[in-house]
Image (spheres, coloured by chain):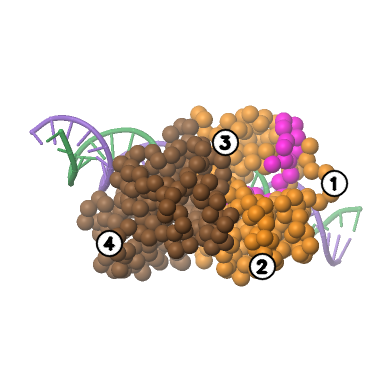
Chain colours: A orange, B brown, C purple, D green
Amino acid sequence: MGHGIGLPALPSDLVALQAVGTRVRFTRGETIFTEGDAATKIYRVLCGAVRLCKHMPDGRRQIVEFIHDGDFFGLMPVTGYAFTAEAVNDAVVVSYPRPQVEKYGEQFASVRRRLFSLLSDQMLGMHSHLVMLGRQTAKERLAAFLCKLVERADAGNGDTVDLPMTRQDIADYLGLTIETVCRELSALKKAHIISAPDLNSIVIRNTDALERIASCED
Amino acid sequence: MGHGIGLPALPSDLVALQAVGTRVRFTRGETIFTEGDAATKIYRVLCGAVRLCKHMPDGRRQIVEFIHDGDFFGLMPVTGYAFTAEAVNDAVVVSYPRPQVEKYGEQFASVRRRLFSLLSDQMLGMHSHLVMLGRQTAKERLAAFLCKLVERADAGNGDTVDLPMTRQDIADYLGLTIETVCRELSALKKAHIISAPDLNSIVIRNTDALERIASCED
DNA sequence: CGTCTCTTTGAGTTAATTCAATGCTCGTGG
DNA sequence: CCACGAGCATTGAATTAACTCAAAGAGACG
């Protein structure tokens, strides 16, 4: 289970990019780019996690997506970035100059297909996020969030899942307050559905119960 | 102002599609396709309005997007549609067989660029929708929704804007209940920011005030 | 003119928030 | 080595924005 010891490999369609990538380190909380910046590069997370945020004038914040090892971000073919990207914890990312990417896109149908498919995956994710924010309760949102983490880690009952982000990050992703996130986490612990050995990991005790809550089939 | 008398024209990049389009009528409430159906076509609304919905097992509903005259939907390059599409009112849509569209995409860079750009517009819209559902109050959501309608209609103070959808549709788009939508509409009327000559139109009285509420700059 | 659907408004309830206090962990400097 | 402070996290108490339930109004249509 899990990926091997090395860094995540590029999808075979995109190996051509390898030559033009630049590796950069970011420390916890550091900004990678800001909403509105010229979108000169596309990015991929090698290790660590990144959050994509929308900041409102009065300080409210909505996290649009968390990006994990091996995932791309900043793909959207637009003038300026639509969100701010920040390192959740210490992270290494690779950046590829957009003109190069577009050149490869023009040349190779396989690259285009892959880019389209990455975009559409993002879109699918955003749809379920939208449903979550619009129509799910706090408990359901948190359960859905944890389910996604569990699924991505390919974990089952008894397994430990890494939780790189803070409670505030989770709250800003779920459209809740930090207190509500804490309370619902405590409720899940009390129900023996999860346990939390430390602040940055959880252990799944009852995957089925978690999925049942997340999927709203009451 | 507004579009002329004829039907909205295809973007010049995509005129090639004209030859392979099939025009279809749908009546108020009718389903165009259902989430999960094989995504064999892409669509464009000629007149009327369409809603893209996610239905939850227990009957809750989230509207992901409203599609208006001239706009495309069902573009995402995936196996099955990610949402259900229904006619908001009587509507005419054109459908284009996806294989044809993909063929043109392979042949013409201009078509590809246009498709990419349509997708990324949708993504931008979804980002602001996400912020709205996650972090804005009922009043702010409604104001933002109306602002978008006003902007799209290129309307200003005193102009009437068409409101094809029901209050319930608006509620399901904004992640609220129908009662809350009604109450906030009444509040905007009382504040002389809008008026509502009938159920399917509103008159903008104070664009600035509306935008001020929508943009959360308190 | 009665029926059906949609909308509006009121009254009471509740899920989630705000405000406040306390606890936990970790790193730094005395 | 321990004490202290900083930064998160957790829990409790009080508040509120939005919800539910209920009743009445307003069109549309046969």
Location of residue A2 in the rendering, given as x and y in whole percent from the top left corner: 78, 40
Residue on which disc 4 sits: B5
Q: Quadrant of residue A144?
A: top right
Cα–Cα gap, marks 4 and 2: 41 Å
Any mark on residue A69, and which?
none
**Looking at the picture, how far across and down is residue A174, in whole percent?**
57, 48
Residue nearest the observer in this picture, B126 or B67? B67
What chain does mark 3 sit on? A
Task: Specify the amino acid type for callout 1.
Answer: Ile
Local packing at callout 3 (Cα closer than 10 Å; few below 14, some 14-19, many 20+) is many
* Callout 1: SS: loop
Label 1–label 4 contact, CB within 8 A? no
The residue positioned 68% from the left and 39% from the top of the image is A150
Residues at marks 1 and 3 touching, judged by CB atoms closer than 8 Å: no
Q: Of the residues under marks 1 and 3, which one precedes in the sequence?
A: 1
Residue under label 1 = A5
In this picture, residue A190 sits left or right of residue A58: right
**A122 relative position to A134: left or right:** right
Q: From the viewer's side, name the closer residue of B5 and A109.
A: A109
Q: Which residues are magenta?
A: A152-176
- Judging from the image, what secondary structure is the residue with disc 4 in? loop
Amino acid type of the residue that numbered disc 2 sits on in the rendered structure = Pro
